[in-house]
Image: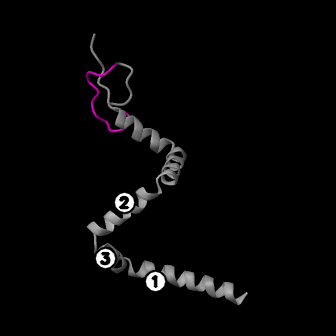
Amino acid sequence: MTALARDCKWCGASMEGKRSDAIFCSRKCYAVSYRKANPEYQREYQRKYNRDNPDYQREYQRKYVQANPDYHSNYRQANRERIAERDRVKRHALKQETDQ
């Protein structure tokens, strides 16, 4: 009896030597596939994690800024037109609010 060549549903890797009813080559591929197929679950999980661990996000941001001191200036330089348009829209909206 010859085994059929099967590939992982997520990454396409060969699943030779895996169980005959296996769909994914690893737990990681299954998890990534599940998160992509169920984005609402992932968003809710992330919100709950952030709510339960508020210091984690602040510490992550602090470390990132420390490791990338030029990030903000580089971002502003690379996105000058986009930022100007965003600011123009904000100013226009504020002006309309005050005019009413």
Of callouts 3 and 1, which one flags the residue occurring earlier in the amino acid sequence? 3
Q: Which residue is mark 3?
A: 74
Cα separation between marks 3 and 2? 20 Å
Q: What is the count of numbered marks?
A: 3
Q: In the current view of this chain or complex, which residue is farthest to the front?
A: 55
- Callout in the foreground (3, 1): 3
| Front position in the image: 25 or 9 | 25
Most prominent secondary structure in the magenta stretch? loop
Cα separation between marks 3 and 1? 15 Å
Name the secondary structure under disc 1.
helix
Give the x, y percent position of residue 67.
26, 66
Is disc 1 surrounded by few (<14), some (14 to 19) or many (20+) residues within 10 Å?
A: few
Q: In the current view of this chain or complex, which residue is farthest to the right?
A: 100
Q: Which residue is mark 2?
A: 60
Of callouts 2 and 1, which one flags the residue occurring earlier in the amino acid sequence? 2
Residue drawn at (49%, 42%), measured in percent from left and top?
37
Residue drawn at (47%, 57%), measured in percent from left and top?
54
Q: Is residue 55 above or below residue 85?
A: above
| Front position in the image: 85 or 75 | 75
Say left or right for 97 vs 39: right
Residue drawn at (51%, 42%), measured in percent from left and top?
38
| Front position in the image: 73 or 77 | 73
The quadrant in which residue 32 appears is: top left
Mark drawn on residue 84: 1
Which region shows up in magenta? 9-19
Cα separation between marks 2 and 1? 28 Å
Give the x, y percent position of residue 28.
35, 37
Give the x, y percent position of residue 69.
28, 73
Name the secondary structure under disc 2.
helix
Is disc 2 surrounded by few (<14), some (14 to 19) or many (20+) residues within 10 Å?
A: few
Residue drawn at (48%, 81%), measured in percent from left and top?
85
The quadrant in which residue 11 appears is: top left
